Image (cartoon, rainbow, N blue to C red):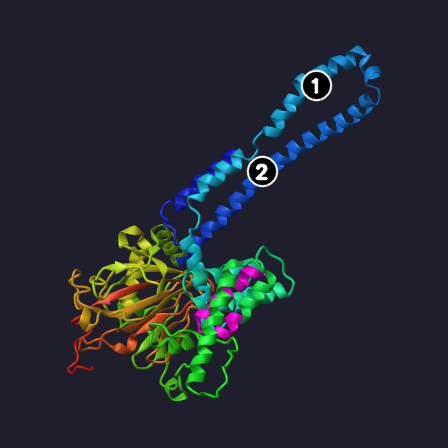
Amino acid sequence: MKLWMSTLLMAWFGVLSYVQAEFFTSIGHMTDLIYAEKDLVQSLKEYILMEEAKLSKIKRWANKMEALTSKSAADPEGYLAHPVNAYKLVKRLNTDWPALEDLVLQDSAAGFIANFSVQRQFFPTDEDEMGAAKALMRLQDTYRLDPGTISRGELPGTKYQAMLSVDDCFGMGRSAYNEGDYYHTVLWMEQVLKQLDAGEEGITTKSQVLDYLSYAVFQLGDLHRALELTRRLLTLDPSHERAGGNLRYFERLLEEEREKMLSNQTEAELATQEGIYERPVDYLPERDVYESLCRGEGVKLTPRRQKRLFCRYHHGNRAPQLLIAPFKEEDEWDSPHIVRYYDVMSDEEIERIKEIAKPKLARATVRDPKTGVLTVASYRVSKSSWLEEDDDPVVARVNRRMQHITGLTVKTAELLQVANYGMGGQYEPHFDFSRNDERDVFKHLGTGNRVATFLNYMSDVEAGGATVFPDLGAAIWPKKGTAVFWYNLLRSGEGDYRTRHAACPVLVGCKWVSNKWFHERGQEFLRPCGSTEVD
């Protein structure tokens, strides 16, 4: 058993040696935690068996001693009159009882603790837990799910039952509170109260919930409800010091509010909030459009436009490699022209690329438009790696295939990027090409701007995870083995701003993609320039 455990640990450490926290940004990496937890359970069961064996020995000894002492204590002198009994009493107290003491003090947990301590250094961090909580809230907002639905695990396409306990929901609310996100704090703390009122048991108390909830609604400007919740808290816990201070503070603010209204000679009554709060406006101007498309709403695929979309066999401008076996091509959008190709990658190729990419996965970065430095960002939640043709023959084969399909050269293209999305993994609306105010982004490459994007879907996604174009009102859903292609630049070389796109949060599933960015240099005769700025 020890040999088996050591082998498993060594294999697991080999997998995790390249992981630097941020498990929540890649489902692929989170799967390693499943095996880690399974190993810990096995180690724990071994510890329990050892403890049970020890307790069984102690119990047998106790039963034996109970029977013996009940007999000897009934007639001590008569019992000890037998010299053998006298000898055995002395021996027991001098030898047997100390041996029992050694058995009781024996540390059966040493093996489990040693295993646990070694593995603990690879556990998720506070950052991971916060990232996972934010991911659930992102899904909650994007797909308009109430906390009750998430708590009950009622998500589309799920194979396994999963529910949030009252303590889990409290953890969600507390995470939001610690981030100053009072909107989600209120939603999750209210869910905790619902589950407590329904009779669910947990270590979380109503007093704890009301403490967070009262201050959160105050921060949202609902003074009346904050006062009401604080009074409820003091009813449950009259000695709650912070609540007493808050009550006096809220009452003073309310009195000042009344005096202000009276001085203005207003007859209007103080309006009471109904406990319904609006989600705060954030930095993304097209947030509503983007999230609607992620839900499959607001797609502008009108019947008239749909009539302009066709399916065909594509031979890449009569490329010899595709004449015998052309690819199935389907129009996804008419202008700008976005197409999908079918059976671009086989299941075997996909698994091999994932296998090569997984050890290299690192938190995906974005380029700061002001400094040009690559950095992580909350609006891009995934891990990615870059594969060279020397890494494996399958990479070279896939690169050649993309070249044949597009008619563009891969000599000046970027390496094949493989990405795996984590919990609620997303990439908010962005451009693939560099804009006029960031001309030097690709200067170090010496290959010009990104002229086109070829995006391979390497997995199906049970729910969510669409590629959407907010300015177009287009939504493209992942299908394993297919790929979508579009030009980022007009023939004039100007950026096509209609191609601003996003990867929607993954609601249920594990999303893998790979992409190739083609650059301008080398395409001069393969995609000639247009004669006007808008060509």
* Label 2 secondary element: helix
Magenta stretch secondary structure, dominant: helix
Mark 2 Cα within 10 Å, few/some/many (few <14, many 20+)? some
- Label whose residue precedes the other's in the sequence (2 or 1): 2
Quadrant for residue 533, please give it: bottom left
Residue 346 in picture, x, y percent from top left:
40, 61
Residue at horizontal 50%, vertical 84%?
269
Residue type at mark 1 is Arg
Given residues 478 and 28, the one toward you in this image is 28
Q: Which percent across, then down, holds residue 266?
A: 45, 87
Q: Is residue 535 left or right of residue 398?
A: left
Residue 475's spot in the image, x, y percent? 39, 76
| Residue 33 appears anywhere in the view | yes
Q: Nearer the viewer, residue 263 or 185?
A: 263
Label 2 sits on residue: 46
Magenta part of the chain:
206-227
Tag shown at residue 92: 1
Q: Please name the amino acid that badge 2 sits on.
A: Glu
